[in-house]
Amino acid sequence: MLSLYVRAIRVIRGFPELVGPVRIPSLIVLVFCAAFLPGPSAFAQRNPDIGYVFPPGGQAGTTVEVNLGGYDWTPDMEFFVLDRRAQLLADGPPGEILVPPPPYWFGSKGRLGAVPLPREVPARFVVAADCPPGPVYWQAANANGGTATGVFVVGTGPQVVEDECRKAPQALTSLPVTVSGRISKIEEVDRYRFVAPRAGPVTCDLVARRLGANWHGCLEVRDAATKLVADVVDAEGLDTALTFAAQTGAEYEVAVRDIDHAGDRSYVYQLTIAAAPRVVASLPAAGRRGETREVEFVGIGVATGALQLESVARPVTFPTDPSRSSLVYSLETPFGTALPFELLLSDLPELIEPAAPAAAPHELPAPAAVTGALDQPTSVDRYLLEVKQGERWTIALEARRFGSPLDVSLAVVGPDGKELANNDDLPGTTDAGVEFAAPADGGYQLVVSDMAARGGTRAAVYRLSVAKPQADFRLEVPQRVNVLLGGSAGVLVKATRLGGFAGPIKLTFAGLPAGVSAPAEMTIPADKSELAVALTAGAEATAAAALVKVTGEAKVGETTVTRQALAAAAGNLAPRGLDGNLVSEILVASMMKPRVKGRPVDQDTGRKVHRGATFPADVIVERLEGYQGEIVLKMAARQSYQVQGITGDDIVVPPGVTNTIYPCHMPEWLETTRTSRMGMISVVQVPDPRGRVRHLVAEMTGFITMTLEGPLLKLAHVPLETPVEPGRPFDVRLKISRAAKLAEPVRLELRLQQELTGLLSAEPLDVPIDREEAELRIATLADPRLAGVRRFTIRATGLQDGKWPAVSETTVEVDFGAKP
């Protein structure tokens, strides 16, 4: 009876490159948690959340001015970068909360969970010249805890930032170029125009989900006559690219949008456009360190420049550096230099599937790795592995990590023809693997197949690796830990033991924040797989945060082995390999107790509110820990539904007060068929035990809840029938409708978009309660920038009960004549 042990396993990039002097192939499972937080606090701290960075990337050796988007951030935020070759420097406090502008979701989508509302911090990424291309992870923390990681991408080649104020497609003067942009609101489509420098392939590559942006991109390419040339949709959430055939000197327009026409300030992206073919696969998919060998590159137009899948061979020298896990290679062709393509580095012999009849299994010497392609729609590849009694083998089958379309499946068939084990998907990936031990000599078939029926081309590649597990261990930890001053937080350190290693593992924590300590002795006992480590923060310590390294040391055979614990970073929503987002530092933050809790008086009970009006909600605040100072109530970043323009002011609660009013401003376009909600947070300023003033944030329990009914005020205008000459004033005739409850004069004011500021102006006009019509005189500047059809808004504001605004707006369209 064959003794077969199958377990969920984890593919480690390139298999052999373990940290330290011993590098062995391994497929042992490592399921890393994305983030770890202590259990819910009895004091309900509101931990800050990370949002986005815009622009999301830049070049090495430059300083990039950015805006950091975060949720429930405070002025005392601290920022951290997990790569010492980059710095992140804040240039100011968080700004006002940013409520999405119109258009809005209505109907069923208006009842979906709201996107979080950010506050932005102006900052600079200072990137050293020796910082390699790829993601740089960053984090933030305050006295309420630490955030997960975000991503900033260091790139190569020319880069530009989207002009978000433009009306026409943005012109790109040369290729290649990488554009940092974002789809900032619903229904937005970003357009870029360029001229093809030569005939041949042009590649457009869109990166969004790998930046942490939770949307699915669509690309469309049109020619000067608006005819569709090519398009692609990221239906699988893996980011997308396309290649099309261009004509010399022809003008093309690339459009970028979300698959669902959604948009938000967090919908950042990078679009790279190059007049070049596109590499989609390589054989082999990995190269042995120090080896120079021929590599077959498969892609669109790589051999002839034609719009077809083809291949070309090039000699490639793979570096010997044991600390590197991949080589970024740019294929040069007569039709342009392709965008960089990643080749893995390995210490195994790297083979290519031989050309042999499909019925005959290919003999696979082990340890080794082989790259093959399921180039027939229903093809199955078989390999013969000769094993001896008592040998243990680790087998990995990878496809997704190379961008292959395959959903691979691996089966092990014994000498008697019976299937002994199979695996389709490992945790978190569609790649596969098994580990087994056989007590008998014999030949075992490794069967490679595709579950998605996406084979049939040379691009349908996979890499099958076979190696003997050797004694070693790996460690995993949570990526962030928040600990309350005067309390403790548990950090679960998990050990994955490899190749029969069963000894004790001594742990150390290096770089803990001041006042936070770990136990003097921390050892994962022999044969145990984890240890819960209690980090303790002194009650009199300062609230602080720091990047911490966790290290394990053990005697493996006669050798003392040291391994760095790894953690899964957030920020990449489409990692190809399970180890693609691992980092060697964790963020540990000490927190202060909140000083406030509270709730709306009628929490979660709908009050009837007029559209366009202000709802003064009664709120109870309870003071904790003896705090009697000022409290600021703010609109929370995370709301219940799509807010559709609902806003709340920052309200100061004076010292000692426990009951207050929080006004919620309701736009006049809100649906009357839904319930609207408002969530709040409280913010206070309190010195920590060392005297440093910190901003403490707590969530207010429940929502202010409102059901909508008709408006108190309605403003309309009479359309202008004739063009207006710039430099001459004109009058807009307005009609005002008021409910009996609004027994106050109405003020009319001109509201302009940025491009009209200074070109139009009007003095505010107060309309008495006995008048239903008025004319607002608007002065114009004799400026050619006014030419064309322009739109602006006139706002009417009345006060309900003498203090709560009711607002209505009308959009006016004026023809200022043809452009000169």
Image (cartoon, rainbow, N blue to C red):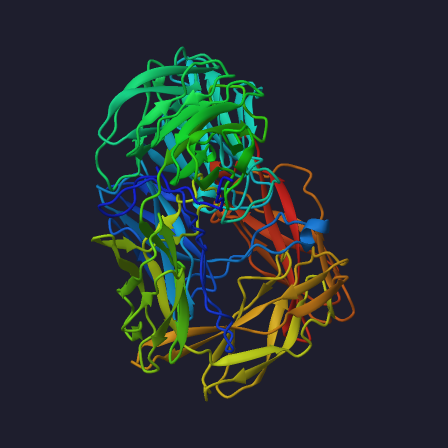
In x, y percent, where is residue 183?
Answer: 52, 42
Residue closest to the eye, 452 or 340? 452
Residue drawn at (33%, 27%) of the image: 350
Q: In this view, does 743 lie above or below 611?
A: below
Most extreme residue toward the top, as rendered? Answer: 304
Residue drawn at (40%, 62%) of the image: 530
* Quarter of the image where one finds residue 397: top left
Residue drawn at (35%, 37%) of the image: 14
Residue closest to the eye, 225 or 680? 680
Residue drawn at (35%, 35%) of the image: 159
In x, y percent, where is residue 668?
Answer: 69, 58
Q: Is residue 555 above or below residue 338?
A: below
Residue closest to the eye, 306 or 735? 306
* Quarter of the image where one finds residue 477: bottom left
Q: Would residue 195 be visible to someone looking at this image?
A: no
Total marks drawn?
0
In x, y percent, where is residue 586?
Answer: 35, 59
Q: Would residue 791 be visible to someone looking at this image?
A: yes
Is residue 789 shown left or right of residue 143? right
In x, y percent, where is residue 771?
Answer: 74, 63
Q: Is residue 12 above or below residue 626?
A: above
